[in-house]
Amino acid sequence: MNALTKTLSGLDLRTEIDRLRKERNAVILAHYYQRPELQDLADFVGDSLELSRKAAAADAEVIAFCGVKFMADTAKILSPEKIVVLPDMNAGCSLEDSCPPEKFKAFREAHPDHIALTYINCSTEVKALSDVIVTSSSAETILAQIPPEQKIIFGPDRHLGGYLNRKFGREMLLWPGVCIVHEAFSETELLKLMAQNPGAPVAAHPECPPHIIDHANYVGSTSGILSYAKNFQGQTMIVATEPHIIHQMSLAIPDKTFIGAPGADGNCNCNICPYMALNTMEKLYVSLRDLEPRIEIAEPLRLAAKKSLDAMLAMASGTVGLGDLGARPFKAMI
Ligand code: 13P
Ligand code: SF4
């Protein structure tokens, strides 16, 4: 028996987490890709942009972040005075891994006339090397504010960047990263599922490759897909994103059927994000009990990363254009 199991044996985790949440003056934030039991106990469940906004505004001493590390890092960047815990510090992201800061810096230096529009799924160091961060729900609003003649590097997700290029007729230079979860959907299996469910609309996340996006009736962020699910006409919908979001759909619209798009063998679990799945009730309990593992970011790095996140929050509300933010030729900030 390991130490964790021994410590936790016999505890009613839900009761203990509720007790600690009050004692610690903690807020529990969860992404839609978390296990249902974590979504159910969270104070707020949302997409990356909504969670960033909640973290910035949270009136709490502790943020327990049920999500992946770049999300918890974002909470700490925006709320440095708060203790931010992540139940499992190994909850990373394949997109973040695909974009080492030193290589990204070299790429920027090779294209000094480009600004860097960067997906939030990246490290704090890459945020510090970027001009404006985007999430999947804010990318279109933000890109629309950048003049067409402005040259742009978009990283690290080449599928989201490619989708934006196609939709807006842009020619952003794309960093070659992918999400291993969305990359795993199979077009052949999706076509079979569509044939078995005639008329069922397909909703896809823009992290999906083009051969999946091309079959989608709706393309958008997790919150966008959830809104689409609440409003579509019909009985059955096919969901091409991480399947834990279906939990929220079933809660909101229990009389409709939501089917997760399949991977290559038709029914594999390869579309469950292995990083998000590292967070569990046990680990959340321990993180609230011990206030560890805790996110720590050196202040100069945090301030450099905060600039590009602040630019996102301002531009996502549609009120501040890039010009107002003082777009600058690239000069390494870290
Ligand atoms: P959104 O929740 O912002 O759509 O992003 C999904 C995601 O990439 C989480 O890993
Ligand atoms: Fe990263 Fe993909 Fe997991 Fe999101 S679903 S955290 S993009 S690996």
Image (cartoon, rainbow, N blue to C red):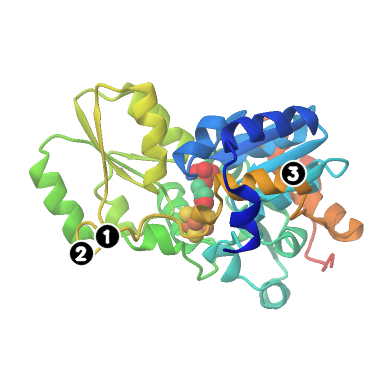
Q: Observer-nearest residue: 281 or 75? A: 281
Amino acid type, callout 2: Asp
Task: Name the residue beneath numbered marker 2.
Answer: 265
Task: Name the residue beneath numbered marker 1.
Answer: 268
Q: Position of residue 178 (x, y in %)?
A: 47, 65
Q: Which mark's residue is nearer the viewer, 1 or 3?
A: 3
Please name the residue shown 80% across and 57% down the image. 328
How would you rate the neighbour count of disc 2 (Cα within 10 Å): few for under 14, some for 14-19, many for 20 or more?
A: few
Q: Residue 119, can we see it? A: no
Task: Name the residue beneath numbered marker 3.
Answer: 289
How would you rate the neighbour count of disc 1 (Cα within 10 Å): few for under 14, some for 14-19, many for 20 or more?
A: few
Are the residues at dot 2 and dot 1 in contact (C-beta closer than 8 Å)?
yes
Q: Position of residue 88 (x, y in %)?
A: 63, 56
Which circle marks residue 106 in the picture?
A: none
Snapshot quadrant of residue 63: top right
How would you rate the neighbour count of disc 3 (Cα within 10 Å): few for under 14, some for 14-19, many for 20 or more?
A: some
Sequence-earlier tag: 1 or 3: 1
Q: CA distance from mark 1 to mark 3?
A: 35 Å
Snapshot quadrant of residue 100: bottom right
Which quarter of the rendering shows the C terminus? bottom right
Q: CA distance from mark 2 to mark 1?
A: 6 Å
Q: Residue 261, can we see it? A: yes
Above or below for 69 versus 97: above
The residue at the far right in this view is 299
Question: Please, what secondary structure does the residue beneath circle 1 have?
Answer: loop
Q: Position of residue 10 (x, y in %)?
A: 57, 42
Q: CA distance from mark 3 to mark 2?
A: 41 Å
Q: Is residue 264 left or right of residue 208?
A: left
Q: Is residue 118 left or right of residue 75?
A: left
Are the residues at dot 1 and dot 3 in contact (C-beta closer than 8 Å)?
no
Which quarter of the rendering shows the N terminus? bottom right
Question: Please, what secondary structure does the residue beneath circle 2 have?
Answer: loop
